[in-house]
Amino acid sequence: SSESSTNDKTLPGTGRQKFETLQVLHEDNMTKIILNRPEKKNAITLLMYKEIGQALEEAGKDESTITVLTGRGDYFCSGNDLNNFASIPPEGKEKMANDAAVVLEAFVSKIIDFPKPLIAVINGPAVGISVTILGLFDIVYATDRATFHTPFSQLGQSPEGCSSYTFPRIMGLAKATEMLLFNKLVTAKTACDVGLVTEVFPDSTFQREVWTRLQAYAKLPKNSLAYSKQLIREIEKEKLHAVNIQECERLKERWLSEECMNAIISFFQSKAKL
Amino acid sequence: SSESSTNDKTLPGTGRQKFETLQVLHEDNMTKIILNRPEKKNAITLLMYKEIGQALEEAGKDESTITVLTGRGDYFCSGNDLNNFASIPPEGKEKMANDAAVVLEAFVSKIIDFPKPLIAVINGPAVGISVTILGLFDIVYATDRATFHTPFSQLGQSPEGCSSYTFPRIMGLAKATEMLLFNKLVTAKTACDVGLVTEVFPDSTFQREVWTRLQAYAKLPKNSLAYSKQLIREIEKEKLHAVNIQECERLKERWLSEECMNAIISFFQSKAKL
Amino acid sequence: SSESSTNDKTLPGTGRQKFETLQVLHEDNMTKIILNRPEKKNAITLLMYKEIGQALEEAGKDESTITVLTGRGDYFCSGNDLNNFASIPPEGKEKMANDAAVVLEAFVSKIIDFPKPLIAVINGPAVGISVTILGLFDIVYATDRATFHTPFSQLGQSPEGCSSYTFPRIMGLAKATEMLLFNKLVTAKTACDVGLVTEVFPDSTFQREVWTRLQAYAKLPKNSLAYSKQLIREIEKEKLHAVNIQECERLKERWLSEECMNAIISFFQSKAKL
């Protein structure tokens, strides 16, 4: 099956790619989920949310010991693809907002419930949802080229990915608010100092150092790792799901608000001018 | 009305000051609440607790986007004015302790429930209750001249302002205990390293840099900021109110204890000797 | 009684040592519990868990203001003595695992419930359970010679001492996981940066500086300290006991697992080869 192959870019016997927006590799007791839209800085489309969710669902059940999320190209991920809001369906914008909230909530739920060590390898700048979910990851390794930016209020929006809960607990409210409300862009070094990132590596040796370390981790007793992670997560899983639901409810309201509409129109207008 | 004026030191048409202990300004989409007893290092009297509470109540409902608390003069605030305990009312010291606890609990409640981004601009040393409430603020900017000191046990007292809950969550128990139980005075730099303070600025440029930044923040979409703050706060509001009540109960017992009485008598005796 | 003496190495009138594995001193308003198996790097036997529990029980009720745990010799503590698993009782290994879990849970419970400031003086390397319980201590002072290591997954085991709850809250999940799941050894400096340790001292002046400071702390108003500590702890005591029970349940399963059995057999084989 694709799960035991070292590269499942193609479905067995079909030649078709299994995922349009991801590459998923299985090697060294690891499942690697690679965001694979480098020409779009790995911006996450609605399809991509679903594909990441499906890839996590499968990785949670496969033979791997640890699962890694990383990006292809210069960016880790530029966040939610604003084209998700570009065309309003015939049923109206309420339908669009509802559908997007359902997709987002399901995506974050998969991360909350992930049963094995989940590791982010941040290969470049990270924006929006690709930053906020990091509070749910067990390990976050970053190149010193990475930056972390969640410009929600600039877009009339509000935090997701459980960051309204995890960020204040990781770094204290005084630092979390500057990121989540006031659009502060932080360097990898600062993100590490406040505890969002586990360790920062020089870009020149990043890939070599990180994968060497992860290969060693993936050889450790599999059940001990999974049960230890579940022990840590179980304590707040219920709370995290409640937070996820509240955040998505608020985002639905935000997406339909004038503040957000105006901000997104400005965004597309400034893009059109370029 | 006073709320739309840029300076409400006087009530409209009366020439009387609205607040005895505060100055409240409305400018640049901001409400600034300024502790205004510089000759007493902004020590908080019972009246002042009530006036800050009232100013917050009004700021929560006015047109401003963010609200800022700062101090006039060299100190941010030297804490609870011990003269609050200097004269025992005819009904006895139990009455005094009860009344003080009611005032304190109401004051802290107003901060817990504040519906917009609440920012502290720490213009100099901060002591006692003016430090402990900082765990409830969304942003804390400090001059490098500021220090943070909560000498409760020296005075036979115990922590308030929800610090028994917020400080261990911000900085870990090992650092919080040294401040809250063992009277450790920390510098602005240390307070920033442990996450109590968002950022420290050189005193020479402090006022200019901070207000420039806050003016920019106050131009962001107002509802996005308020809803995002409420999303973060809502998760633990109930817990914070419970903590506030427990802390005030304990302080009532402490204020009537021999340990506290002796410590306060010593304080006034050493003052009298000067 | 032994509790008011400055040194209770011997029971009054008997000449017998009260504890086989500890030395307990009473001086300067402090109770000092000293791990006293330096030839075994203070590895904790089943008897030693019980004796520490008993010493804490007594210290909680004695006249001291603060209680200190430290180690005799070069190590603070090398963790759980693996000889605890060396001989399987006639009732089978299930009985052994059950008994060990009961002892461990009771030991950690005593620390959760301890009613006064509890201070760790980390005189050298700390391993396993002697690290994980530190999240429950109010102050942790360490020599710069100290290291902190919790190699659970290497041994097929899982975290205890409430560390699955306290560590992510102290340092964030991204740093906690590297210690608790991936066996990362951290220096005293790093442990201090992430908030597990209160302060680090040069080894040459460690003992002098720390005891001088603790003597000053022990002169503070006793009830203020105890009530302040209880105020902080009360908020999460119930949660901590629930976590302790879950961790011990998981460890029982782990101790009987093949992963753990194989790891412990390897440990004794490699020891036998030396």
Image: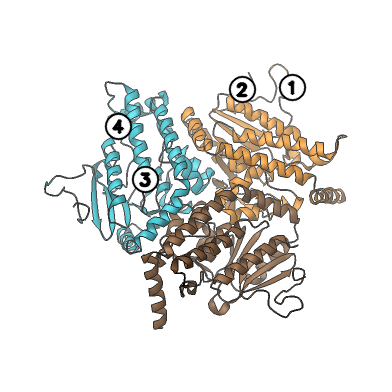
Chain colours: A orange, B brown, C cyan
Q: Nearer the viewer, mark 4 or mark 1?
A: 4
Q: Residues within 10 Å of mark 2 (few under 14, many from 20)?
A: some
Q: Residues within 10 Å of mark 4 (few under 14, many from 20)?
A: some
Whole-Å distance between the Cαs marked 3 and 1?
59 Å
Answer yes or no: is residue B67 visible. Answer: yes
User: Of callouts 2 and 1, which one flags the residue occurring earlier in the amino acid sequence?
Assistant: 2
**Which of the 4 image quarters holds residue B106?**
bottom right
**Which of the 4 image quarters holds residue C267?**
top left
Q: Nearer the viewer, mark 3 or mark 1?
A: 3
Marks 4 and 1: CB-CB under 8 Å?
no
Q: Which residue is mark 3?
A: C111
A202 left or right, relative to C128: right
Q: Which residue is mark 1?
A: A16
Image point (50%, 46%), residue name: C169
**Which of the 4 image quarters holds residue A114?**
top right
Q: Which residue is mark 4?
A: C84
Whole-percent x, y for residue A272 in the image: 87, 48
Whole-Å distance between the Cαs marked 2 and 1?
15 Å
Inspect the image, locate mark 1, and give the three-letter code of the amino acid beneath it. Answer: Arg
Q: Which residue is mark 2?
A: A3
